[in-house]
Amino acid sequence: MKLIIDMDTGVDDALAIMVALAAPDVEILGITCCHGNTPLENVIKNTLRVLKVCNRLDIPVYRGCGKPLLARKQHAGDYHGKDGLGDVPDPDAPGLELLKKKAVQAMIKIVNQNPGEVTLVATAPLTNLAVAVQLDPNFPKKLKALYLMGGNINSRGNTTACGEFNFVADPEAAYVVLDRYTCPTYIASWEFSCRNSLPWSFYDQWLAQNTEKAEFFKKISNLTVTKARSAEYQKETTEGKGFNSCDTYAIAAAIDPTIITESEEIAVTVELEGKYTRGMMVLDYIEQMKKKHKAVIIKKVDLEKFKQMLMNSVK
Ligand code: BDR
């Protein structure tokens, strides 16, 4: 299968890349970078760093949008570290000479060269995708499918009371994408990933594998994992008491849709105005919006298959 991955490479995006690279029959045609977890320059460096560890610097990486359409720029440094990858210095980080420009134009070009064949996975704020459909209104129709990590299904936020980071970081872009991408669309929401988190015993066993990739992921995830495992954090959360690598679910579902064991098709949009609710995903259960296009909201995945994908990703 052919993939384009649009990301804001932080810790869980890094794992998503590793999972995609380890999957058989997956061809990554490009990674398009977007602002988000960390400023765009870090996103680019982090993406190249992950590809270097995986010995896949042949995959083209593109510079995308550095800020949201209208919203104020924000990052998730508290969670992913200031550099977006757990603040672990890397003296051998690859230089930027391999970086390609114009992510949005590249996305459109790649999809035009492979109409109906490319699955787009987005694990970042949706700015690049929103600009793509402005430049080429037919772009979504030429995709095989779109898989998103973003939004929330029960108004439980992680960035604002009601908002998930990727949607809150660029609500207007999320609105455009949910409105205009009429291709098959799959959404891995925040609460879904919380409910499908993995036991810490799995995390320990998984990263005990003595490989360069396991070592790398252990180092870059240390900051987030230490926080997530702390008693204080466990007190704050009512769901997801385990390893929750949200972006990785979107990639896993794109690579092997049979991993999805429960889902629901619903028309969705995003709230743009509320004082407390701006950026919250809205699910139209009573079909009031009269939208024809429905997204598949992923509810559960086969965790054994998912664990196997993670196992393979660090081999
Ligand atoms: C999303 O926000 C980011 O911090 C993660 O990488 C993920 O894409 C979760 O809300």
Image (cartoon, rainbow, N blue to C red):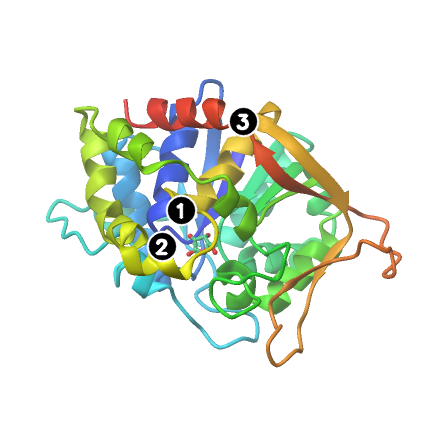
Badge 3 amino acid: Asp
Secondary structure beneath label 2: helix
61 vs 236, nearest the viewer: 236
Q: Identify the mark nearer the N-term, 2 or 3.
A: 2
Q: For residue 235, what is the image quadrant?
A: bottom left
Q: Which mark is residue 234?
A: 2
Q: Position of residue 65 (x, y in %)?
A: 47, 62
Query: Tags 2 and 3 in contact by the CB under 8 Å rule?
Result: no
Location of the N terminus by quadrant is top right
Residue farthest to the bottom? 275
Report crowding for label 2: few under 14, some 14 to 19, many 20 or more residues within 10 A (C-alpha): some
**Label 3 CB-ligand 1 distance < 8 A:** no
Judge from the rendering whether residue 196 lies leftward or rightward of residue 280; answer left or right: left
| Quarter of the image where ligand 1 sits | bottom left
Q: For residue 259, what is the image quadrant?
A: top right
Secondary structure beneath label 3: loop
Q: Is residue 284 visible?
A: yes
Q: Identify the mark nearer the N-term, 3 or 1.
A: 1
Residue located beneath label 3 in the image: 302
The residue depicted at 56 percent of the width and 53 percent of the height is 150
Badge 2 amino acid: Gln
Residue located beneath label 1 in the image: 241
Query: Tags 1 and 2 in contact by the CB under 8 Å rule?
Result: yes
How far, Cα to Cα, is label 2 from label 3?
A: 24 Å
Q: Position of residue 210 (x, y in %)?
A: 16, 24
Q: Position of residue 17 (x, y in %)?
A: 39, 37
Residue farthest to the left? 91
The residue depicted at 38 percent of the width and 45 percent of the height is 12
How far, Cα to Cα, is label 1 from label 2?
A: 7 Å
